[in-house]
Image (cartoon, grey):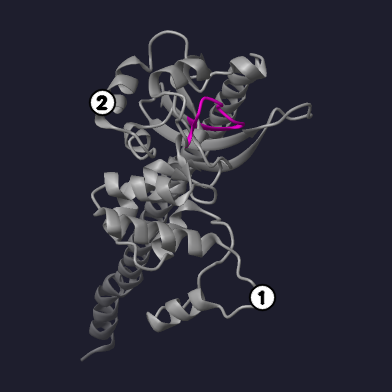
Amino acid sequence: MTVFARNARRRRMRPSARRRPDGFIVVAVLWILGALATLASIYAVYVINTATGMSVNDDRLQAEALLTAALELAAYRVTSADTDNRTSQGAFAFRLGRANVAVEFKSEAGRIDLNSAPKELLAGLFAGLGAKYPDAEYYADRIIAWRSSQDPDRPNDETSVYRSAGLPYPPRQAPFAHAGELTLVLGLPPFLVERALPFVTVYSGHAEINILSAAPEVVAAVPGMTPDRLYALLSQRGQGPQNEKFVQALLGQDAPGITADPGRSMRVAVRIDFDNRRRVRGEAVIFLLEDAADPFRVLFWRDDFDGPS
């Protein structure tokens, strides 16, 4: 091959040699664009999640503020009247910000106090919830044994009973800290505990129940309550003046286990309907204070942000 032919061949090969780097650059650019698109998608998801999280936090802050306002208004409704004429229950509604708020409050004495109630009242509740009366008395005995302190000079028989039953814990032998402790009491069936929880408390401090705000299941547990008395009370309870004389006249002079005194503990249920259609429910138990800087102290608080009860 002549020198001229070799040079011509080299000239024909040069354009293709130059195109090789161009193809590599195109592939690299496509990879970079793909990576940028992925990063942009990840960032978009992050921004959306952040915005959603901030919205939830904003709703929670507003809900807590509205719940606090509801508690303050409920406390004012109760304490604005003199002690002898305080109401045992009530309801009201208001609008604040971008939400409508519905409030119901009721004396906590309308529930049976696990730390104060006598055996007869506890047994009456379990019997009314479906237990046979001998079993109901046994459950009441176990509750009283759980909350009763042990004499240090005597053998701890109750602890021995729990140990013999194979339970990994002893009885508290002190006041119930929470109504949910009923699930730990020896011998109580879980289904019966679930039925009883809406009607018991540890925040009342009264051995009696407030007959004006108690649920029918609680009223039926009162010793000596007959079906006729129960019907008469429930049919007339919301009419006319609700006071102790009215209750005593209806049930008779010998009516143990009841009172018309609302006490100083109130359970407040709140429903908040935001304009964005979100609904939040909350519940609290407050203890009304006398001659204090704060009108009440919160004993219990739960709302939808805390999860299921």
Rendered residue at 30%/17% (across/down): 235
**Residue appearing at x 66%, y 19% in the figure:** 83
Q: Nearer the viewer, residue 41 or 272?
A: 272
Determine the image quadrant of residue 153. Answer: bottom right
Q: Quadrant of the N terminus?
A: bottom left
- Is residue 101 visible from the viewing direction of this image? no
Measured as percent of width and height from the top left, residue 27 is found at: 32, 66
Question: Bounds of the magenta span?
Answer: 257-268
As drawn, the label of residue 190 is none
- The reply, left or right, for residue 21 in relation to residue 297 is left
- State the SS at label 2: helix
Q: Earlier in the sequence, mark 1 or mark 2?
A: 1
For the residues labelled 1 and 2, the Cα–Cα distance comes to: 47 Å
Residue furthest out toward the top? 240
Residue 216 locus on image (x, y percent):
32, 32
Residue at point 23% right, 49% down?
130
Label 1: how many residues lie within 10 Å, few (<14), some (14-19) or many (20+)?
A: few
Of 166 and 136, the residue lying toward us? 136
Q: Amino acid at mark 1?
A: Pro
Say which residue label 1 marks.
152
Where residue 150 sits in the image (x, y, percent)? 60, 70
Question: Given the image, on which type of amino acid does mark 2 rest?
Answer: Asp
Depth order, front residue of 3/35: 35
Q: Is residue 255 above or below residue 306?
A: above
Is label 1 in a helix, a strand or a loop? loop
Q: Is residue 285 among the parts visible in the rendering?
A: yes
Q: Quadrant of residue 38?
A: bottom left
Q: Is residue 208 above or below residue 120?
A: above
In front: label 1 or label 2: 2
Q: Is residue 290 above or below residue 203?
A: above
Residue where numbered disc 2 is placed? 228
